[in-house]
Amino acid sequence: MEKALAGKKILIVEDEPVFCSLLAGYLRTLGAKVLVASNGAVALQVLGREAHIELILCDLDMPVMNGIEFIAKLTNEGISIPVIIISATNKMAEIDEVLRLGAKDVLLKPVSDLNEIKKSVLAYLHPTVFMSGAIEQNNLNKDWLTLKHNSDEALNMLKQLQPPVSQVIAHCKVNYRKLNMIDKPGLILDMAALSDNELAFYCLDISRSKEYGVISALLLRVVFNSLLQEHIVHHSRRLPSMAGILNRINNLLEGAGLQGQFPLLLGYYHTINKTVLLTSAGLHASIKSGNRQIQLDSGVPLGTLKTICSNQVCSHSAEWQCRIWNTNSQINLMLSSMYSG
């Protein structure tokens, strides 16, 4: 009988010799051809000389080049080999970042059962067999059901995933302040780089749906990650279709059975040509640049209609502020391009 991983070439990127040896030996018993690298820099050298590597198993905390830097390098160079993270990290932000960069799965150390690694490896080497649409949808429904019955845990997860109040992203200095009424669920902010000179952000009001507000925020993060990866893979010079993205999110919320109103604002900034796009479906917002201020009509929240007719503004500025608010909360964003001119 043919072994499960017969003929498959797998690269392990791991700086712990004992675990690396254990994992390599296990995969070889399943028929895989295994290559090893002690950090991301060595792994890139292996990829440069070895053809037909089908899967990468990668740690995060490594010297010289860590796992996040390694995956970012793969993404920037257009290397589309699936990556599964195996790490002892307890930082949600790190897990979130590698998933946004395109990692297919994250397994946490210590790994007590190597069969869990086998299942994950098979799922991405044989997706038509192990990852049918029915299985994926069933797993998704189970995850949502678990989170629905553990709303405090889900809310705590959201808080951990909030972006830092000050950071540099896509050559743009970003700062923000959030003001929420005590004991009131408020506005959830998220942002990420689309490229070296583009960033996107969204703001979701989770207070309008008591039952599904937190769950919708977690689902939106999944959708946002997917949109980021699509933009990276199919990057073009055209500006993103903000209205199209809003309607896509609206359909996904409906398809997931999440009922209620979900006010949402999407933002986009190109730090070279200074283009600012804001699209709102149910949230108040304004842009201020110098002495100029633009008010954005709130529009209709997601979850209200089958098709959303959103309101959008377009502006150009090297430095600008965005105020987003509802009845209980507000967020003040300050953005400044690091490109001169």
Image: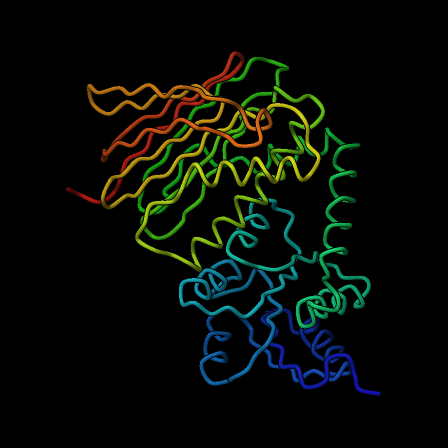
To which quarter of the image does residue 58 belong?
Answer: bottom right
For residue 128, above or below residue 233 = below
Measured as percent of width and height from the top left, residue 67 is found at 53, 61
To which quarter of the image does residue 127 belong?
Answer: bottom right
Residue that sits furthest to the front in the current view: 306
Q: How is the image coloured?
A: rainbow
Direction from residue 70 to residue 320 in the image, left or right: left
For residue 75, above or below residue 221 = below
Residue that sits furthest to the right in the current view: 1
Direction from residue 160 to residue 233 in the image, left or right: left
Direction from residue 279 to residue 172 in the image, left or right: left
Rendered residue at 63%/36% (across/down): 253
Count of all numbered marks drawn on residues in the image = 0
Measured as percent of width and height from the top left, residue 122 is found at 72, 70
Quarter holding the C terminus is top left
Measured as percent of width and height from the top left, residue 126 is found at 70, 72
Query: Between residues 18 and 201, which one lies in front from this camera angle?
Result: 201
Quarter holding the N terminus is bottom right
Residue that sits furthest to the left in the current view: 341
Measured as percent of width and height from the top left, residue 248 is found at 53, 41
Query: Between residues 33 and 300, which one lies in front from this camera angle?
Result: 300
Direction from residue 71 to residue 303 in the image, left or right: right
Rendered residue at 72%/28% (across/down): 152
To which quarter of the image does residue 161 belong?
Answer: top right
Query: Between residues 167 and 206, which one lies in front from this camera angle?
Result: 206
Rendered residue at 71%/66% (across/down): 123
Rendered residue at 61%/46% (across/down): 91
